[in-house]
Amino acid sequence: MTADTSMPIPAAETLQYLKQPYGELAWLINAHAANQPDRIALDDGEEQLTWGQTAALVNRIAAQLQAEGLQKGQAVSILGTTTIRYALLYLGAIAAGGCAAPLTTSATPQQLAAMMTDSGAGHLFTDHAKRAELADSGLALPDLKHVMMDAPDDSDGAPFLFDWMAEEGATPCDFETGPNDPYNIIYSSGTTGTPKGIVHSRQMRWYQMAVGEESGLGLPGQVTLLSTPMYSNTTLGIFIATMAYGGTAVVMRKFDCARWLELAQQHRATHTILVPVQYQRLMDFPQFDEYDLSSMALKYCTSAPFSAELKAEVVRRMPGALIEIYSMTEGGVVCLLRADTNPDKLHTVGIPWGGSEVFTIDEQLNRLPAGEIGELVGRSTTMMSGYQNQPKKTEEASWYDDNGERWQRMGDIGRVDEEGFVTLLGRSKDMIISGGFNIYPRDLEDALLKQPEVVDAAVIGIPSKEWGETPLGFVVAAGGETLDLPAVCARANAELGKTQRISALQQLDELPRSHIGKILKTALREMVSET
């Protein structure tokens, strides 16, 4: 069934409400239910809910959480596949005055147990697959009330979500949350140790909603197609804004090129957010040009390096505007690149937006002038409150100006040109120092990606007796063919400076990536150390 997008959205009073300095998403959800009860709010391919149904279920979840003792700002853990029910629980936790804590499904049971403890949650909403994984681990889990998202658990009586929630017609009690109260905790996707809990305030999330019109959200008839997991900040920012403006969110349980194209065409999707590897797969999909994507008004991209060549291809072949977002879950600067109107700036991630500011600092933490390469430092209205229970880590990620105001260290090396456009050169922890020279992997990776037979590339530094470190490249071939690695390396090196030369290449079937498409260089280093 195709989502009904015929109802008028949003009503004038909701737009006026969004112009306030601060407000509550719960108010907007109920307003949309009153204004457009029959418009589809959520669709995951298996279930579909109108705005009237969505508001009623969110209120029943919120009321039950409160009845079971949820305190203001207390976390609610959610662990499982992205579905309508996942979305309802996220919204219900917020509507109850709590703090949503979506947990990364790719984390180990040990990490998940640590996240639950760290968050201080009293509830865990999960599905059978993840519950079985936790049970099989044999770990002693925190004492949380378990509720099943997909079906009851006959083994120990964990209730099913729709049996657990408050009775029909229930609404939560009024709560007094403020701008500085926690909205959600997003756990970083670290590959080792326990991920850090990044706390976003209600004010930070409200700002993201309130500026939706400026960033291209809030169009009448908006249908947003989401294909990245809901525990990712990549997804949540656009999902929350879609809900705030009364749009329709079509969520995919797992990304698949054919299915994404079918859904975009079927629902006449107007908005989407994808990570670069998803755009690349769509561009490589043989039947891509057979689908009607003419309804697409705006596409976003974020979370990983987005090559200038790929941006140009997406602009050429996909309808609608293309906006690249550069930021981090912790906040700091937010940069936007309107790729379709800045063809000469595709090598950048755009300019600071929405009151953001950015500059670079040197290794002694001194501010550098425009054009100088250094670590990026940013400040915006969407900065995190801090890392959950880790004040030392929060401090390490901070830089203070002469007025004592806190800025976020972005962890990236780059430059800011005279026009304010930001060029990224790589993560500071990934910088290679070879023979006393700083080498930025992004330059080397771009040279490899220019080779026609290479579709994916990454470069890391490995120990060298002669140079201290030397660059080692990893490449993925188009069509899975066997590459002439010395020839590819020689052509790439011909485009690089003398001190930047790649020492050798290794071919892989695919690069290790996180759930949102970031290349896991830690995994590449481990691969090298094991050989």
Image: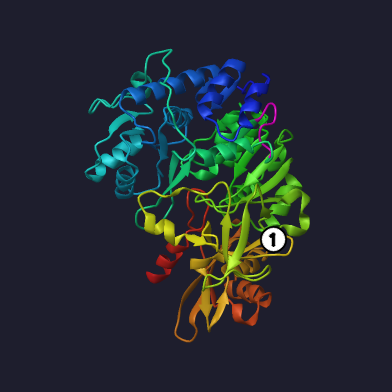
What quarter of the picture does the N terminus occupy? top right
Residue drawn at x 41%, y 36% as measured from the top left? 99
User: To which residue does mark 1 refer?
Assistant: 347
Q: Is residue 275 magenta?
A: no
Residue drawn at x 35%, y 43% as measured from the top left? 119
Q: What is the image's colouring?
A: rainbow
Q: Residues within 10 Å of mark 1 (few under 14, many from 20)?
A: some
Is residue 364 at least partly visible in the picture? yes
Q: Residue furthest front?
A: 403
Give the residues in magenta.
216-222
Q: Name the image quarter holding residue 306.
A: bottom right
Q: Nearer the viewer, residue 188 or 257?
A: 188
Q: Nearer the viewer, residue 412 or 476?
A: 412
What is the magenta segment's predominant secondary structure? loop
Q: Position of residue 458 (x, y in %)?
A: 55, 64
The amino acid at mark 1 is His
Give the SS element for disc 1: loop
Q: Position of residue 441 (x, y in %)?
A: 57, 69
